[in-house]
Amino acid sequence: MVSTTPITLRDLAAIPVERLRGVGDKKQASLAKVDIRNLFDLVTTYPRRWIDRTNEARIADLVPGEEALVLVTIRSVTKRTTRNRRTMVNVNVGDGSGRMDLVFFNQPWRERQLKEGLHVALYGKADTYRGGLQMSNPVVDMIGDRTGKIVPIYPQSEKAQINTWEMAGWVEETLRRCAERGIADPVPERVRRRLGLIDRSEAFAGIHLPDDMKTKELARYRLAFDELLRVQLVLVLRKRALERDSLGIEHAVGGEMVQRFTASLPFPMTAAQQRTIAEINADLASGHPMHRLLQGDVGAGKTVVAVAAMLAAVDGGHQSALMAPTEVLAEQHAASVRAMLDGITVPDPDNLFGDRPLRVELLTNRVTGAARKDVLAGLADGSVDIAIGTHALIQEAVDFSSLGVVVVDEQHRFGVEQRAALREKTADGAVPDTLVMTATPIPRTAAMTVYGDLDVSILDELPPGRTPIVTMWADGPLMESGVWNDIKDEVAAGRQAYVVCPLVGESEKLEVASAEETLERLAFGELQGLRLGMLHGKLPSDEKESTMDQFRRGELDVLVATTVIEVGVDVPNATVMAILDADRFGIAQLHQLRGRVGRGQHASTCWLVTQQKEDAEGNPVVGNPRIEALVATTDGFELAEVDLDLRGEGTLMSTAQKGRSDLKLASLRRDRKLIELARAAAFDIVDSDPDLAGRPDLADELDLIFSDRDEEFLAKS
Ligand code: ADP
Ligand code: MG
């Protein structure tokens, strides 16, 4: 019996490519090399671009000096080596209207690529040369014998020996065979209608065989939406399942300790802090465990928010824990949290006064012996209310009496497993509420994909009264000398400075050498006479500590440091920073480093020092988009957007989510709006059908596309 139901992606995945005409053993092996094994792989291998032949010119119509697209046939190819040892490939091409020459410099492989008789599309600027027309180094697309107004160009791989017109032919055959039954569309009609999405069959046809560029765009939009929807569905299903399956603690929010704490603050909360605390409180009060990301730029005041959440747990008789990525940070947190909570008491019926002081304890590997025993005992019997520490907190031997709230600072430094381990220190089977704080701003929509199973709160407002840091670019030695003068002036005025050493490769050893070299150079040169100290990762920790203490106490004028000072260092009297070879750092890192100044009442400056670059002809290179972005704004979220634009999502995706291979068309950068729409659609679908029981087709598609490992990965990241 011939099936008449529409063909699903799983059906396509079940048909091996050998079933196509012209795919024998050899082509099958070639296709396997580029991971195309079945018809699903094939139809989701999308064109890299499309040539719009309606814009095509004829050779006879080419205007010298103007760019144009021409479709031509190769007539002859010759290769030679010029006197200055460059290879030069000359190609003569023609169309019905005339002929011209192409010349390719230093692309010897063109000789192999461009064979007599092939049809190619050329995009370039024609010039007159010795009386005829010539294009040098044009963009070449092999199009074979494809007709049609829009010619898709598929990714080609020389190693796989597959060309774009073969790909186009196989895709066309596949789609032709699907035409009668149509391709199944598991996305609910109401979602499609609301978003104006075209049908999936149309979309596959439209991306591979468009009649015009507009159709291609609609098709891309639809298929990109599908990719994003699938990712969001996995994340949202997982999020809802976690909420459903694990029992949380219904914290008593707005209790007395929290109120006393907020009243004791020497400043009013910013609107962003108030909003964020309200969002967290709603989570805390609910019976579902909180799983929330708190994003806030350096200095936005995340600590106050975290303390309010931790106190809510203590108010209800539970404990809380704050986990920091390094010992230094843990110690700093402990000191500042203790100071903030000074004078706050906890009800204690055994005590003569009916209460006792709130107890905050530090637990790192540096806390040893009797002190450690004491802290561990206090955690186990509940007399320690707030524990602050490093990963030492999650070791086996650490037992909490009743852990209610967990705050994880700077999550990018932790493995996902560590976070999970802390969550597993449950109180009577109830899962503690988790708040993850990060100072690395990520654009909102990217966060939706990278942290899709977390709720996100954003502290997008700095407390008032900060003097914004002025950032300047010192390009070349002349401007650099101005930087050293500025540092000397600031020191003369009683301020302090940081000098961040050039980033040298990945090796810590080289970095140490760079720090030592910089220190020496400055001590005997530009900053002679000032009191200099040095900080890098290889120093023993007590030495690091004593250098930091000296700097904090003002006994050092200038701290020459590697990127170890990126997080946590807080010296309000430091008002200048010079970052050497700043063009070697990424935007996010420069932004983090810059956050070390501008922490006090004095105006601060950050100098981005670069060595003037020259191009091949010896002209100075002007402009550096990353540096210019930092000069233009101190807003971390704005910078994150610029970063995403400049780098593409590659880096963002590759670090956090190797499993997300499904995004072939969609882009975190270009499709920001579509990500939000997909996320909303995923919530709509899951909330009306929590395990997709009524949508087996959609559920099946997720199974097909995400291996178990991917799903786990998506859910965990
Ligand atoms: P983050 O952890 O987000 O980098 P912190 O929590 O360390 O920022 O806060 C930075 C500084 O701002 C601290 O000195 C803190 O006391 C102060 N601060 C926090 N909230 C406010 C506010 N609403 N108004 C004024 N100062 C604030
Ligand atoms: Mg809760």
Image: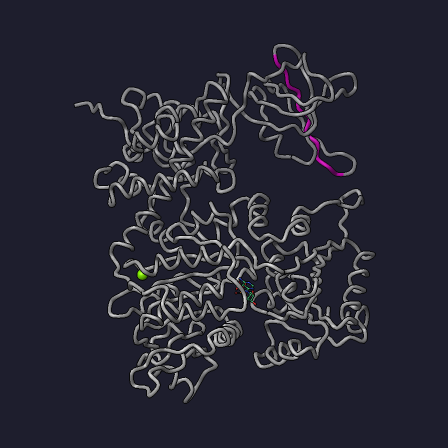
Q: In which quarter of the image is the C terminus?
A: bottom left
Residue at the image position 48 percent from the left and 28 percent from the top = 164
Residue most toward the left?
A: 1
Using residue 194 as the reference point, say whether residue 105 is left or right of it: right
Q: In which quarter of the image is residue 483?
A: bottom right
To which quarter of the image does residue 76 belong? top right
Q: Where is residue 197 in the image (x, y as percent from the top left)?
A: 38, 28
User: Considering only vertical position in the picture, is 518 above or below 683?
Assistant: below
> Main SS type for the magenta part?
strand
Q: Give the x, y percent position of residue 431.
A: 29, 64
- Residue at image position (81%, 64%) is 485
Location of residue 226 (image quadrant): top left
As for residue 706 lying within the magenta part, the answer is: no
Q: Which quarter of the figure is the N terminus placed in?
A: top left
326 displayed left or right of 529: left
- At x 33%, y 31%, the residue is 18
Where residue 115 appears, as percent x and y from the top left, is 58, 24
Judge by depth and name the residue closer to the eye, 399 or 343: 343
Q: In this view, does 190 lie above or below 272?
A: above
Number of marks drawn: 0
Q: Is residue 90 magenta?
A: yes
Asked whether the viewer can see residue 461, the reply is yes
Q: Position of residue 16 (x, y in %)?
A: 32, 33
Q: Give the range drawn in magenta.
A: 85-95
Residue at the spot x=63%, y=60% of the render?
Answer: 466
- 287 versus 714 height, above or below: below
Q: In which quarter of the image is ligand 1?
A: bottom right
